[in-house]
Amino acid sequence: MPSSSHSRRSRSTRDDDQSSQSYADEASTESGDVESVKKDQKSNDYYQRLREVLTPKNVFLYLGLTSVIIMVILGIFTAAIVYLSQSIEFDDLELDCESVFGKSDHHIAAEKYAKKAYKELNETKALLSNKSPYDIPSLLTFKHPDLVLSGDDVGVDQYLPKNIYPYHYDVKLRVQLPVNGNNDFKISGHVRIEFNVTKNTKRVYFNARDINIENAEDWRHRKLHVAKGDHSEVRYVEVPDLMEVGKKYHIELDFVSQFYKGMEGLYLSRYLDTSGRVHYTASTQFESMNARRLFPCLDEPYYRSSFTFVVEHPPSYDAFSNMPNVSRTLIEGGQFTQTTFAPLPNSPTYILALLIADDYAVRSTKTKDGTEIRMLARNEFIDDTKPALDFGVKVLEWFNEKFQIPYPLPKIDIAGIYSFEAGAMENYGLTTYRENIIFTGSKYSDVSEHDYKRVIAHEFAHQWFGNLVTPEDWSQIFMNEGFANFFESYAVFAIDGGLETYSMSRAIHIPVFLNDAKQVHPNDFVSDSNLELRYYFDGVTYSRGGAVFNMIRGIVGDDIFFAALRSYLSANKNGHAHWRKLAHALQKVIPKNNELSKIDFEAFFKAWLTVPGFPVVNVKKEGKKFTLKASLFLKLSDPIMDRRWPLGQTWPIPIWYRVSSDILNLKFVMMEPGKELVIDVPGKDDVIFVNSENHGYYIVNYEGQLFEKVRDALATEGTHFLSDAVIRFQVDACPLLLTGVITSKTYFDSLNTHKNGAKLIPTVARMCGYFIEGIVKDTEVSSIHAKHMHDFLEDAIKSKMEYRISDIEINADMEEAELSKIDRLVEKLSCKLDQTKCTAKENYNFEKYVMDCRPTDQTADCVKLNVTEREQTYCQGIKTNNRKYYEQLVQLFTNSRNTFEANRLMNGLICSKESQLLAKLFTLFTTPNDHVNKAESLNYFETLSFEHPELTRKLFLHNVNQIVNDFPSSAAAFLYTALISNTEKDYLEVVQLLHDNRTLLNRFAHVFRDILNDSRTALEAQKKVLPGIIQYFKEYHTSQVVPNAKDPSLCENFGSCI
């Protein structure tokens, strides 16, 4: 059988060959191309042999051998990668981490990039090939590129047409939340909007975002079609009849909305109690434009209306809102509870609030005029909120008395929210806070009394500035935040003592001045997008606004200042805020025969509030004559500008000063815009102390040798009581150093001279030291700067520790808070300088106090270390690469039910040096999940970036689009944290990203402008300031210089090493 079969196959082949040959012969005969026929014959022979070789059996054999070879090569390569990238002790670290945290599929696996060498930056495009970081291509000058107007990018300058004005809303909501293990998360509702017509129209415009409107009717129950407006968050209905001016109408809408995945609109918090039971809270955050996420409304601060809320929710939950509830009734056979709230009077939409929770306790007290103040918090922590509740009573009574306009609602709540992005929110009658602000348990809280009091005072001040009087549009938001910023400390000082040094406490916040030193927006501005508006709830809106208002207080004095505020609030009650109205109130209350009446306050506010930037006052001395001249203070010499906001160049500047020979006599003069001011003094040896009371919002630069003369005069025994002037002098010295105006020697000499000259000098040194640390990081003087800071602070606070109970000179709570911060910094610097000793101590603490905890224990109960020591102990334990320490900390974090302790434990894990663990943590922080509190994701990310900047940056660049989409409300902060650059390579990497990702550039141009400006500022400081710092330590601390490990040759250059 086999042979005959073979015969037939051979014969068939021969027959085919003969046929082919005959066709070839015919073709050659017809064409006469014999050579062509021969070539074809050879080709046919080649393919015939190939067919004989490539039998199916042979093909499978070849493929099998090739696969084996490839697998062997890949196995060797993978083994090498694993060996090089993974610690022997942590060979299954990734699996352990996944078993606790789970594996994310939202991003490209971040850990993949921790195992691979990061690809070098692509060769810079031709446009950038010969550019230095200080010569930005025209593409990146940010002459305000057009923004994509969709979603978060809706232009806020496109306000609704003002053809109607709502006066009342009836809002009914059904909020379905999990009960008995189900996972129902649904929101539906009905709204009736009643309005006056201000311009004849057939259309009613309103806002809605991510809302499905299922039915719309007019006042005659006629069905209406809901159409889209010009922007994605604008809707309108058109009624059949013309609506006439002066008449009242209404529309009714049925809708379905949704829980927002971020922390805006109505959103969810999920947490576990100590028994392991899961709890949910639904809470709102509507500022700036997020009420439209919950129900259709005219969602602009211009529109003030009354509101009635009816909320249907599961019976096991309680509902809270701006006003007290008037009824709570079971409906639908007990499946739902209907809670009805009393009508809320005249309010804008952004201060509405709703809280629905199944695990909240309530504590209540009353002010002397009968206003109820309630604390709303998780059951397990309600007893730790009493100090915050007690202070709420004090500060509300203080505001009532100071403004002489009683708080208008029957109650005000202080509610702790587990997942809350902002620090706090001033909702009318229901203020909301991050839990760690109002929980004060000594076993876990490290928030000082001064800090939580400031936050509560800030939100309560808003009940007048913002809620009673509301910005007419978002350009005036600083009228809310600036006054709240002013009163957050002023009220606390007035209540607890130390008001005499309130301005000194404002002056110590150097970062505010440095923030304004870059090119930023003015206070009065219109944003081009919701993203930009959210981003500019910043130091300019808050602290700069507060500083300008404090400057006005310094000019007119407390009596006139508060009289003007009372006049302003009374005249605009339930109306709208604008700085021109405040200027009018000031002019109104100042007597005509008072010299202050000559000041044009409207021109003053216009100069300070409508242009960015602020001045430096340069002071020269010639004999008995001092000449003062103002100029724009620039932290960066050639900033990237925004064409909308040209920099300010001239200001009316209030000058307070004292003369050294007559220090008891405070003098005041207004320096006219653009003009010099000449001050004559009695003696040739006299000096003047400018801005001696800390009222002025400007920097003072004493030029040349005058700086040392003023420094020494302030240090003399006769002027020791001029604490404000000493603080002012040292505060101004910091930005002058960082911009290269004064030398490093000049700065450090002045710091040493004034070390014991005022109680807050250590705080000023700590704050400026933070910026200096950024300049010297990874240089040969990094360690010696740390030593210098450690010794200075330790010595400066020794005497302070001996009198913790202060006199009236300064607020005791604030002093305690500052000393505590310095204590912790000194301890941290000690570890940096003596890692071996520190590690031994912390390992002992870890073994004794942390390892004794069972995984199910709460660390606040089982770790018997002082609250301020725990995080350092966790961190040092993890740095040892001890596997059992790591496993213990992971388990304690997983089971932690306390926000404070969870943060400390996670910050301890971030101290790891293992790239795989860090990559897993990165994924955890940048992916929405239930393993970490979403309110803390950004904080954890910032800590990760600070501890491991290079790794964090690389991972972020690979996942940037996913992260900004997953965290839209905090995308700007993620971008800034990850991409701020201290090297030219990192800087150009950001430039390359913007070339390659124009969508990201268009959405976040305002953020990248700051990133590039601040990065260039750091690079410029390295060139202008760092050499001087190195020289200072070279000349005065040679024996202590620790060379950079990257360049051992520096050891020889400095003469000695340790």
Image (cartoon, rainbow, N blue to C red):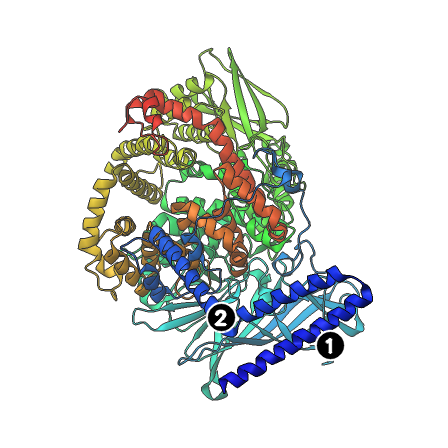
**Residue 216 quadrant:** bottom right
Residue 559 appears in view: no
Q: Residues within 10 Å of mark 1 (few under 14, many from 20)?
A: some
Q: Is residue 273 left or right of residue 257?
A: left
Report the amino acid beneath label 2.
Answer: Asn
Which quadrant would the C terminus be assigned to in this image? top left
* Total numbered labels placed on residues in the image: 2
Q: Residue 598 at x, y = what percent?
A: 63, 31
The circle on residue 512 is: none
Q: Nearer the viewer, mark 1 or mark 2?
A: 2
Q: Disc 1 on helix, strand or loop?
A: loop
What residue is drawn where x is 51% and y is 31%?
Answer: 1020
Residue situated in front as seen by the camera: 504 or 263: 263
Q: Residue at x 28, y 61 (%)?
A: 892
Q: CA distance from mark 1 to mark 2?
A: 75 Å
Image x and y of residue 485, in percent: 49, 46
Residue 422 at least partly seen:
yes
Residue lying farthest to the bottom in this orientation: 333
Nearer-N-terminus badge (1/2): 2
> Which type of secondary structure does the marked residue at label 2 adopt?
helix
| Whole-percent x, y for residue 312 in the image | 51, 78
Q: Is residue 961 left or right of residue 821?
A: right
On the image, numbered disc 1 is attached to which residue?
Answer: 224
Q: Which residue is mark 2?
A: 58
Q: Quadrant of residue 100?
A: bottom left
Q: Is residue 614 above or below residue 844?
A: above
Structural crowding at the residue carrying mark 2, measured as other residues with C-alpha within 10 Å and reported as few (<14), some (14–19) or many (≥20): few
Q: Nearer the viewer, residue 936 or 959?
A: 959
Query: 903 or 436, which is in the foreground?
Result: 903
Q: Position of residue 196 (x, y in %)?
A: 71, 67
